[in-house]
Image (spheres, rainbow, N blue to C red):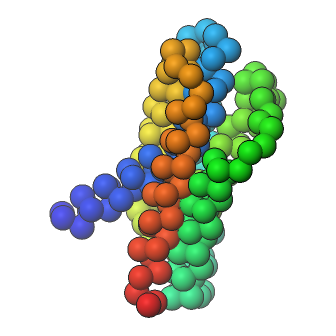
Amino acid sequence: MSGMVGELVTLLLMAFALGMDAFSVGLGMGMYKLRMKKIFNIGITIGLFHVWMPLVGLIAGKFLSDKFGVFATFIGGLLLILLGVQMVWSTVKKGEEKVISPVGFGLLLFALSVSLDSFSVGLTLGIYGAKTIMVIICFGIVATVLTWAGLLLGRKVQSWLGTYSEALGGAILLAFGLKLLAPFW
């Protein structure tokens, strides 16, 4: 029972880290005075992508785990570290942000762009042997709620908070990657 609670806490923290990307982008997008129905649809779409992408990653990761074992765990840890560093780095570097309109194809592109990292994390979790149902439920619910929170909060505050939230998410992924690599040191 204790192991399952530990895994659930770990998955919720990872889901939070991945959802911070959707939160930060939603925070900026929320400043465009979207209607509540549109905010609801955006959150659900991003939540579904955060279910689908890690599911595909989990399936691929479980296949790799059966074939490559310990080496796959090492690669999974490296992937998490790279994702974490990339998220932190993207908050540090100065660049132009492109705004994707959250309707139709633009919404699908937006959802895909903020959920791509969940595929890699799903791949890592599949290698690690995480429980599929727990992963997709945690990732989907947390991403949906954080997206809604970002969009709603974006209507109220300045966009500087989004940068810090993405850096926090990257730091959490980096820490989990280091945790996976710890047995190799």
- Residue 95: % across, % down: 78, 43
* Residue drawn at (52%, 42%) of the image: 164
Identify whether 80 is placed above or below 35.
below
* Residue drawn at (40%, 87%) of the image: 183
Quarter occupied by the C terminus? bottom left
Identify whether 86 is placed above or below 79.
above
Q: Is residue 10 visible?
A: yes
- Residue 28: % across, % down: 64, 26
Q: Quick one: which residue is furthest to the left in this view?
A: 1
Residue 42 is drawn in which quadrant?
Answer: top right
Using residue 77 as the reference point, say whether residue 141 is left or right of it: left
Mark count: 0
Residue 61 is drawn in which quadrant?
Answer: bottom right
Quarter occupied by the N terminus? bottom left
- Residue 134: % across, % down: 39, 53
- Residue 10: % across, % down: 36, 59
Q: Please tell me which residue lies in front, 87 or 101.
A: 87
* Residue drawn at (56%, 11%) of the image: 36
Q: Is residue 41 visible?
A: no
Q: Please tell me which residue lies in front, 170 or 89.
A: 89
